[in-house]
Image: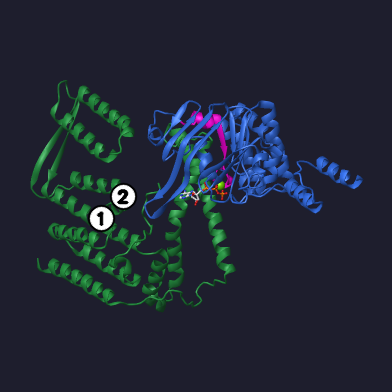
Chain colours: A green, B blue
Amino acid sequence: MKNIVIGRYIPGDSFLYRMDPRVKLIALFILFVAVFVIDELLVMGLALLGILVLLPLGKISLKKVYFGLRPLLFLLIFTFVFQILFNTQGRLLGTLRLTFDPLNVALSVGIFAAWLFLKRFTSFTFISFLVMVAGVLTLLSQLTLLASFGSFTIAIYEEGLLFAIFILLRLVIIVTLSTILTITTKPTDLNLGLERVLKPLKIIRVNTEEIAMIIGISLRYIPTLLDEANKIILAQASRGVDFQEGKIKDKVVQIISLLVPMFIISFQRSDELANAMEARCFVPGKPRTRLNQLTWKPLDTAVLVVTLTLMIVSIGVRILW
Amino acid sequence: MAIRLHTVSHTYTAINQPAVHALKDVTLTIDATDEFIALVGETGSGKSTLVQHLNALMAPTSGTAELFDVTISAESFKDKSIKKTPIRKRIGLVFQFPEYQLFEESVLKDVAFAPKNFGLSQADAEEKAKHALSLVGLDDTYYARSPFHLSGGEKKRVSIAGILAMEPDILVLDEPTSGLDPQSQKMLMDVFESIQRTTHISIVFITHDMNWVEAYAKRVLVMQSGELVFDGAPDALFNHPELSVWKMDLPDRKKVLNYLQSQFKLQTPMDDFTQLLNAINGEGDQ
Ligand SMILES: Nc1ncnc2c1ncn2[C@@H]1O[C@H](COP(=O)(O)OP(=O)(O)OP(=O)(O)O)[C@@H](O)[C@H]1O
Ligand SMILES: [Mg+2]
């Protein structure tokens, strides 16, 4: 729980930390556009390579980025598998014919159960999951001793496979870029940057300061809420709630015993925060001065030029390829 | 020995924060019966962290915690074949902040939650809950009320009742009297004492008020920046030269005694008022 990175600032020092938050936001936006414009797997691969170069330059370890990706791991896998299974365009690469008979189905269930049981003893849950899936697939496709009662053919097409990889890369790049932003930017700076970047919207009477404040506060409170959740889990564990065990019926009670205090505490917190802000004469929408002024440095211009170039290149590649 | 901590250290780590060494080599034993222990120490000295090791909520970063013959260490904590729930039933811990645990729609249901989790039927659990609520001074008008619409002190009582209803073998209380008016504080401390006297279970309570230490505790533990710096009788603590180094205060009675003693320029230290009065009278006679 404590290693969830979304919205967490991690102190450090590198050019990524020194950039103006406005530039970071604009650069992120430009790169997003570039990533969505790219439609070639090869170029997407190059983009990923670029990120892999950027990380050590910015002194951000892969581990931190992985912690940012981890909550989305199953979403990524799901999209990947979905694409492979249901996209039937292009050349047929190969098929895997799964035949079900009582014996191999029973064995597969056995393997799955064994994985469920063994996963608690290993810290490589994810890798063991992949091994388990591979094992079950091999078993179902190779071993048919008894009379089969059904079969299913997984067909993998070139287009499907490539597109699946393409989508996976795109998602990984987007999440990684966003993680880099939150890791390297203090919530207050992010907030300020956002407010300034959104400023032009004021012309169409959007209250940009409030929007920036709401986003800033939400980001700020994610880690706090996670800490609270941890404390609630411990307090309920003292009363005999075992969050790691339990039948479905128990699970429901467990989750309620976590969520209800969570909501109550969040409302309480927001009440307190509102009071604290009012006590310091905070009036929404009033012009305010800032303790830290943003300064535009040559680094920022350079970054903007580089990202803009990347975007133009990717648009060019898309049109000309 | 019911609880035996052996060189327990605990370090809080988070990837974006400097490590906090909240416990450093704490060694300590607590009997299963007839202990009444006060745990004191300045804010942030690690008291709450220590008590969470007493019922297997946390694992030591290094060292071991033997809790009723189950040994908890950094490795064994992860082993899910070692069940922690039975330990938590036997060693009941009341948290410092009641907001973290109240969730049911009525006070009675909330208090019955723990006994139900430990396998009692609904009816039996409610029976225990009613008894526990009466112990902490909440009568039947509270049963149907929502725990969220109570005052801070009432919430505190409900959370204490929630653990009392489990009938633990050892009761651990993290600041049970904070946020209560003086009368309720005394009332609750009396409840704990009478529970201790009648059932002979061991009780550990955290407090910042030396008056409770003096009035109730048979043994006192002092924490200072993660270390256990004192383990002994309350009287020995009050006469300890390093008392002020540990940011500890004397109980009011002691302060009055000391004041009078210095006013009357008495040489021998006095332990109670009768002794003091005798000394003063004796002086007057001469
Ligand atoms: N979840 C946590 N993550 C990181 N550090 C923590 C955490 N909980 C406590 N600490 C730190 O560990 C130290 C001991 O905290 P602890 O809560 O045990 O103190 P305490 O003696 O109970 O204080 P108090 O009298 O205020 O309740 C403190 O420095 C605190 O900041
Ligand atoms: Mg505490």
The residue most toward the top is A146
Q: Which mark is residue A72?
A: 2
Q: Residues within 10 Å of mark 2 (few under 14, many from 20)?
A: some
Amino acid type of the residue tagged 2 in the rendering: Leu
Position of A60 compared to B19: left or right?
left
Residue B218 against residue B13 in the figure, above or below: above
Which residues lie in the magenta part? B84-101
Position of B209 compared to A111: left or right?
right
Percent from the top left, x then y, of residue A258? 49, 43
Q: Identify the residue at horizontal 75%, vertical 49% (top origin).
A: B258
Q: Are marks 2 and 1 on the same chain?
A: yes
Does residue A44 belong to the magenta stretch?
A: no
* Chain letter for the residue marked with disc 2 in the picture: A
* Nearest the eye: B181 or A264: B181
The residue carrying mark 1 is A171
Amino acid type of the residue tagged 1 in the rendering: Leu
Position of B84 compared to B207: left or right?
left
Confirm if mark 1 falls within 8 A of ligand 1. Answer: no
Q: Identify the residue at horizontal 14%, vertical 51% (top origin).
A: A162
Marks 2 and 1 close (CB-CB < 8 Å): yes
* Nearest the eye: A14 or A192: A14
Indicate the secondary structure of the residue bearing disc 2: helix
* Among the two numbered marks 2 and 1 on one chain, the one whose residue lies closer to the N terminus: 2
Q: Quarter holding the N terminus of chain B?
A: top right
Does residue B91 belong to the magenta stretch?
A: yes
> In the figure, residue A167 lies in which quadrant?
bottom left
Q: Is residue A256 visible?
A: no
Q: Identify the residue at horizontal 46%, vertical 45% (top origin).
A: A230
